């Protein structure tokens, strides 16, 4: 099993990054927040190899904690890789674990594709399995929203292109076209980088 891949980020897409190694191989990794990376940046990305009859995909994470949470989410009936990525992209592992511990279904149903039934399964299946995430969290991680996650660090060109890239990234996370248009309309006057726009949009989704 591939535990992690070290190499240079060759290019970034709305749902993935491609990392090249010194063996001349490029790996496409589906990530919760591709725009936290930078092209030409040297990175170590922790991986999960997901295999089913019709697909074999690599998923990449900046931390082992994110990957561990991803694997636990996959054990919940009704949550697939795409849904798990969207959850991790939207909040810190500590926040997700805290919501499960509190049985906060209202918070959990704000994630794309998570209804009350699936949120209930998350609580039932994960409450005892996520204690370490909540126990190791700082107060800021639990109460301060997205600020501690540091989801995005890449500097991207400002303007219309940034808004378009942000919209595509949100759709790749599982939000519908109408949901994306609605939240992006609230940000149309904002002059931000792509990563700042995505972060702000995710905060709006969670807070509504």
Image (spheres, rainbow, N blue to C red):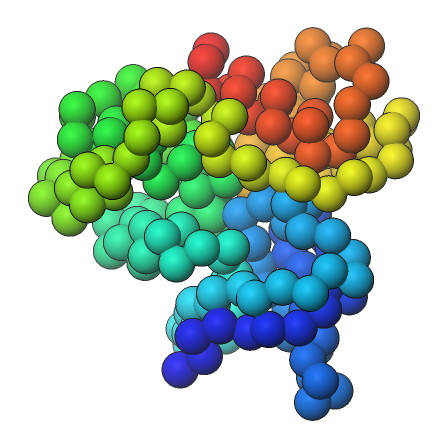
Is 53 or 194 nearer to us in this picture? 194
> To which quarter of the image does residue 139 belong?
top left
Q: Position of residue 83 (x, y in %)?
A: 43, 45
Left or right, 158 with respect to 26, comes to: right
> To which quarter of the image does residue 188 belong?
top right
Residue at figure coordinates x 32%, y 57% from the top left: 68
Circle count: 0
Q: Is residue 7 above or below residue 141?
A: below
Q: Position of residue 67 (x, y in %)?
A: 39, 57
Q: Position of residue 49 (x, y in %)?
A: 44, 72
Is 122 or 137 nearer to us in this picture? 137
Left or right, 63 with respect to 65, comes to: right
Q: Is residue 164 above or below residue 41?
A: above
Quarter of the image containing the N terminus?
Answer: bottom left
Residue at figure coordinates x 46%, y 13% from the top left: 207
> To which quarter of the image does residue 97 belong?
top left
Q: Position of residue 186 (x, y in %)?
A: 69, 10
Residue at figure coordinates x 19%, y 45% from the top left: 132
Is 198 or 184 nearer to us in this picture? 198
Q: Is residue 135 above or below residue 179?
A: below
Residue 86 visible, this orientation? yes
Residue at figure coordinates x 53%, y 47% from the top left: 32
Residue 174 visible, this orientation? no
């Amino acid at each position: 099993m591939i535990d992690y891949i070290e190499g240079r980020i060759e290019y970034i897409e709305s749902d993935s990054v491609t990392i090249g190694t010194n063996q001349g191989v490029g790996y496409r990794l589906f990530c919760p927040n591709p725009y936290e990376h930078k092209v030409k940046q040297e990175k170590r990305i922790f991986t999960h190899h997901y295999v089913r009859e019709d697909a074999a995909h690599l998923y990449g994470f900046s931390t082992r904690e994110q990957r561990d949470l991803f694997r636990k989410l996959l054990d919940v009936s009704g949550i697939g890789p795409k849904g798990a990525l969207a959850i991790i992209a939207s909040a810190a592992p500590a926040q997700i674990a805290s919501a499960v511990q509190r049985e906060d279904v209202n918070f959990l149903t704000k994630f794309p594709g998570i209804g009350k039934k699936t949120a209930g399964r998350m609580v039932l299946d994960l409450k005892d399995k996520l204690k370490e995430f909540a126990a190791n969290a700082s107060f800021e991680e639990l109460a301060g929203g997205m600020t501690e996650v540091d989801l995005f660090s890449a500097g991207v060109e400002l303007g219309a292109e940034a808004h378009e890239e942000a919209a595509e990234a949100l759709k790749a996370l599982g939000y519908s076209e109408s949901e994306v248009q609605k939240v992006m309309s609230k940000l149309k006057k904002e002059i931000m980088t792509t990563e700042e726009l995505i972060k702000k949009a995710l905060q709006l989704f969670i807070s509504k």
